[in-house]
Image (tube, rainbow, N blue to C red):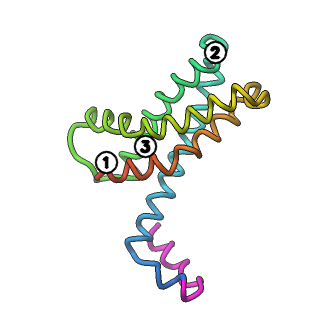
Amino acid sequence: MEALILRLTEHLPSGVRAYTTAKRAATLAQFLKFGGVGLIGLAIDTACVYALRGSLGLYGAGLVAYVVAASGNWVLNRVWTFRGQGSGKAHHQWGRFMAVNLIGFALNRGTYALLVTFLAAAAQQPVIATSAGAIAGMFVNFYLSRRVVFR
C-alpha cells in the first residue's frame, strides 16, 4: 500500500510532493488500514446496539457494543494494521489497548450519548450516533494505538 501511495504522489504538485516521504507514506497506509478496521468495528458496534437495545436500552447496549467492537478492532489491528509491532503477551496488549482508548471511548460514547439523547433521529436510528462516535474517537485512537499499544 505504501508503494501505491508513493506512486500516486507523483501526480501531486511539486510543493506537496516534496513533503512525501516513505515514512509518511507508511503512516498514511497504516492510518488507512486502521480506518478499514474501524469500519468493521463500526458494523460490529452498530449490530450490537440494534441487537441489544430492546433488552439493555440504548445506553446499556452502547456500552456493551463498544467493548465488543473495541475488542474486535484490537484483534484486527494486531494482525493487520500493526502486524509485527508491539510486544508482550496478547492479553496485556489488549488491556493496554482498552486502557489507552478510554480517551477515544469518552469522545466516541460521549458523542453517541449526546446524539441519542438530544436527536430523535439518532435515538430511532442509532447508526447515526455510532457513526458519529466512531469518527469522533478515530484520530485519538490511532495516535494512542500507534504510540502506546503497538510501538
Give coordinates of residue 117: x percent, y percent: 70, 25
- Nearest-to-viewer mark from 3 and 1: 1
Kindly state the secondary structure of the residue where label 1 is placed. helix
Q: Which residue is mark 2?
A: 57
On whether residue 7 falls in the magenta region, the answer is yes
Callout 1 crowding tier (Cα within 10 Å): few <14, some 14–19, many ≥20: some
- Nearest-to-viewer mark from 3 and 2: 2
Mark positioned earlier in the residue sequence (3 or 2):
2
Callout 3 crowding tier (Cα within 10 Å): few <14, some 14–19, many ≥20: many
63 left or right of 76? right
Callout 2 crowding tier (Cα within 10 Å): few <14, some 14–19, many ≥20: few
Q: Quadrant of residue 43?
A: top right
Q: Which residue is mark 1?
A: 148
Give coordinates of residue 79: x percent, y percent: 37, 47
Kindly state the secondary structure of the residue where label 2 is placed. helix
Q: CA distance from mark 3 to mark 1?
A: 17 Å
Q: CA distance from mark 3 to mark 2?
A: 28 Å
Determine the residue located farthest toward the left in the rendered image: 88
Q: Amino acid at mark 1?
A: Val
Q: What is the span of residues highlighted in magenta in the rendered image?
A: 1-15
